């Protein structure tokens, strides 16, 4: 079912939850992105339902073969893209929840064990109270005071400053303003806190290169999506032009997209969204491939506590984890939606659950109150 609420800075907090039921009574829940950009918000759910027949009568422990069977079913329907890959992700996560519960172990133990028992987070701060440099700096200081060792800000929202509505060129005044925003934020938090900057894939090649070079001395943790996701060769040109750390990945899916990013030397850091990219094992494959290039993994994340904990199991199990996004700071009901070891977030960290499976369940009462667009709570088969 689809659960969530659209509100300012929610980052599309409308999630698709998938339940897989077994004849032994174990129920697994997985979360994935809702592809809520489509008007109904049900694109992912509809895709999940079309894959249901491939699972009936199967052994949930056969995650690998079941995953490939579903993935290959989609090859004539944009199988490597959204929302098909989102649906795969939700189903695969539910299967891992089942296997963990059946064996009485947390998911990370199925992935080779634990490099770390808590996951370092960065807060996505979006912007300041206003769009002025001092407001960015003030917001950054406020969030760092909560315990975060890393923050991220957006710099692509000054659309009214654009000289042309349709091109992706950053004009001179807009570029000056963007660089001022980043410099003021860096000055506000100093150099002992990590600072990432998100461009949301809305600049053209010369603008991206100009910005990346202009902020080289500000030692960013990364500059995110300076270009749209489609042309990896163009992103490789940005990376080759600058010492600024270049990061992308929230709009890339499965090992095949990440293979191209790595092969074309287009990134310094990858940021797959683990509720979108294909599933827990697929995320592990992506991370391992990045590790062979000495590239760290810093996942994009706008999930509920359930999907975020699923991501934490993966991140506990890989050596090359850097930092995980937390997008729920301003969502008052974020913790309420789920049951588990609370608080889920403390001073910029998330502890990895040791309960069987993912270790987080939906709170049915809260979830029912947040059903999206008239949807019904899970219907058991
Ligand atoms: Mg982003």
Image: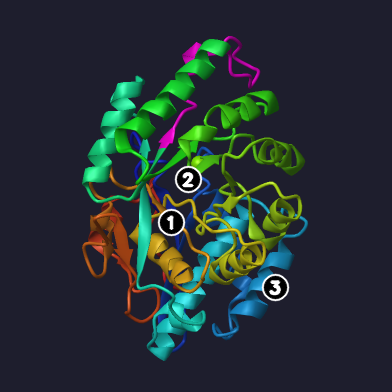
Secondary structure mostly taken by the magenta-highlighted segment of the chain:
loop
Image side of residue 229 versus residue 346, left or right: right
Q: Can residue 237 be seen in this view?
A: yes
Q: Mark 2, mark 1: which one is toward the viewer?
A: 2
Mark 2 vs ligand 1: CB under 8 Å?
no
Q: Earlier in the sequence, mark 3 or mark 1?
A: 3
Question: Residue tagged by mark 3?
Answer: 69
Q: Which of marks 2 and 1 is nearer the N terminus?
A: 2
Q: Is residue 159 magenta?
A: yes
Do the residues bearing badges 2 and 1 touch, measured as CB atoms within 8 Å?
yes
Question: Residue tagged by mark 2?
Answer: 221
Residue occupying image coordinates x 37% and y 64%: 119
Percent position of residue 341, x then y: 24, 70
* Rendering quarter of residue 52: bottom right
Image side of residue 346 versus residue 48, left or right: left
10 Å neighbourhood of mark 1: few (<14), some, or many (≥20)? many
Residue occupying image coordinates x 53% and y 65%: 320
Does 356 sit above or below residue 197? below
Residue occupying image coordinates x 34% and y 51%: 371
Question: Residue tagged by mark 1?
Answer: 323
Q: Distance between the residues labelled 2 and 1?
A: 10 Å
Residue interval drawn in magenta? 153-171
Percent position of residue 44, x then y: 55, 53
Q: Does the magenta stretch include residue 268?
A: no
The one of 211 and 286 positioned closer to us in this rendering: 211
Mark 3 vs ligand 1: CB under 8 Å?
no
Q: Earlier in the sequence, mark 2 or mark 3?
A: 3
Please say which color scheme the image uses. Answer: rainbow
Image side of residue 279 versus residue 263, left or right: left
Does 49 sit above or below residue 269? below
Q: Is mark 1 on a helix, strand or loop?
A: loop
């Amino acid at each position: 079912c689809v659960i969530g609420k659209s509100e300012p800075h929610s980052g599309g907090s409308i999630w698709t939850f998938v339940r897989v039921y077994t004849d032994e009574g174990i129920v697994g829940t997985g979360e994935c992105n809702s592809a809520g950009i489509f008007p109904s918000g049900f694109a992912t759910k509809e895709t999940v339902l079309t894959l249901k027949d491939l699972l009936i009568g199967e052994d949930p422990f056969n995650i690998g073969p079941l995953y490939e069977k579903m993935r290959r079913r989609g090859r004539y329907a944009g199988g490597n893209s959204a929302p098909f890959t989102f649906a795969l992700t939700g189903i695969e996560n539910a299967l891992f929840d089942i296997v963990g519960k059946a064996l009485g172990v947390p998911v990370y133990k199925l992935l080779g064990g634990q490099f770390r028992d808590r996951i370092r987070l960065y807060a996505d701060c979006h912007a300041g109270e206003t769009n002025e440099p001092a407001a960015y700096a003030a917001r950054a200081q406020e969030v760092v005071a909560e315990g975060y060792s890393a923050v991220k800000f957006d710099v692509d929202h000054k659309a009214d400053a654009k000289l042309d509505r349709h091109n992706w060129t950053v004009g001179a005044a807009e570029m000056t303003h963007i660089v001022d925003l980043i410099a003021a934020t860096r000055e506000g938090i100093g150099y002992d806190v990590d600072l990432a900057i998100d461009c949301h894939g809305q600049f053209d090649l010369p603008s991206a290169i100009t910005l990346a070079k202009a902020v080289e001395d500000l030692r960013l943790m990364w500059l995110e999506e300076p270009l749209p996701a489609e042309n990896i060769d163009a992103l490789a040109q940005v990376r080759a032009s600058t010492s600024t750390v270049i990061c992308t990945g929230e709009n890339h899916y499965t090992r095949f997209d990440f293979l191209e990013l790595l092969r074309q030397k287009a990134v310094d850091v990858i940021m797959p969204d683990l509720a979108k990219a294909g599933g827990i094992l697929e995320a592990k494959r992506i991370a391992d491939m990045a590790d062979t290039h000495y590239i760290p993994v810093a996942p994009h994340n706008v999930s509920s506590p359930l999907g975020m904990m699923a991501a934490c199991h993966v991140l506990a199990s890989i050596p090359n984890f850097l930092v995980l996004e937390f997008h729920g700071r301003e969502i008052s009901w974020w913790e309420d939606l789920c049951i588990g070891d609370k608080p889920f977030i403390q001073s910029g960290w998330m502890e990895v659950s040791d309960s069987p499976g993912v270790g987080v369940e939906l709170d049915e009462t809260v979830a029912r109150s947040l059903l999206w667009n008239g949807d019904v709570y899970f219907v058991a088969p």
